[in-house]
Image (cartoon, rainbow, N blue to C red):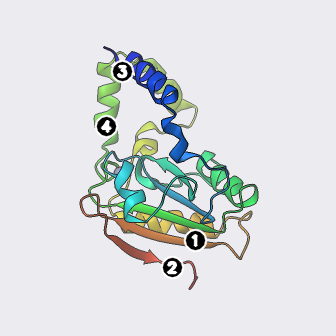
Amino acid sequence: MKALDEILSFNEEFVHNKEYETFQTDKFPDKRMVILSCMDTRLVELLPKAMNIKNGDVKIIKTAGAIVSHPFGSVMRSILVAIYELNADEVFVIGHHDCGMSSVDGDRVVAKMKDRHIDPGTLSTLERSGINIKDWLRGFDNVKDSVANSVDIIRNHPLIPADVAIHGLVISPETGKLELVTSGYEA
Ligand SMILES: [Zn+2]
C-alpha cells in the first residue's frame, strides 16, 4: 500500500475510535513558548519528551537545521505570529548534534538535481536572477555558531519586543540532553 493510502485508512480508524480525545487542546501555547528546531527524524518524539512538552504546550517550527535564514522569511513570520497572536513570550532555538545541515554540499545537491532531470538551463537562469543555489542550500559548519547566529537574527529583529527572551540550545539526537548556548534572560 502506498503511504498516502495507508495514512488515509489509518486516519479513518483513528477518528472513528476517537483517539484524538487525549490530544484536545486549543491553539494558545500553555507554556507560552515557541520552539524553532530541526526537521530531523530523531527529534520527532524525543525533543518534546526531553523537554517535558505535550500537546497544547508550545508552538513548534521546524526547518532543516533550525536555521533562521532570512529576517523576513516564513520562519521569522511564524515566530512573530506566535508572539503577537498566540501569546508566546519565550523563543527557543534548538539545533542538534550530527545535523544533516552540517554536511550539505551544494555541489553534490546540484549534481543530484541534474541527475533527476532538472534542466541545467533552469539552474543558470536562477543564478542570473541572483539566486546562488549552492549558497542557498548550504548549512553550517558548527551547530553552536549556527544557533547563536539564528538567535542574533531574532534578538536584533526590529519587530521583536524587548521583553521576549530568546534562548539558544543544542540537543543530542541520541540522549535528548540539552546544552545551553545562550540564555535569553541574560541577553
Ligand atoms: Zn538537523
Q: Mark 1 points at which residue?
A: 166
What residue is disc 2 on?
Answer: 183
Q: Viewer-proximal residue, 28 or 175? A: 28
Q: Disc 3 residue type?
A: Ala
Number of residues whose C-alpha sits closer than 10 Å to that of mark 2, classed few (under 14), some (14–19) or many (20 or more): some
Give the spatial CA distance, label 2 vs label 3: 41 Å
Residue 16 x %, y %: 51, 25
Residue 54: % across, % down: 49, 57
Check disc 3 and report the residue beneath it.
Answer: 3
Which of disc 1 and disc 3 is earlier in sequence? 3
> Residue 181 in the image: x percent, y percent?
42, 75
Tag 4 residue: 107
The image quadrant that residue 114 belongs to is: top left
* Of the image marks 2 and 4, the number of the one nearer the N terminus: 4
Q: Few, some or many C-alpha atoms within 10 Å of disc 1 (few <14, some 14-19, many ≥20)?
A: many
Identify the secondary structure beneath mark 2: loop
> Rounded to the nearest whole Å, what is the CA distance between mark 3 and mark 1?
38 Å
Question: In front: 148, or 110?
Answer: 148
Residue 129 image offset from top left, x and y in percent: 58, 32
Amino acid type for the residue under numbered disc 2: Ser
Q: Residue at x 24, y 59 (%)?
A: 174
State the residue in front, 45 or 104.
45
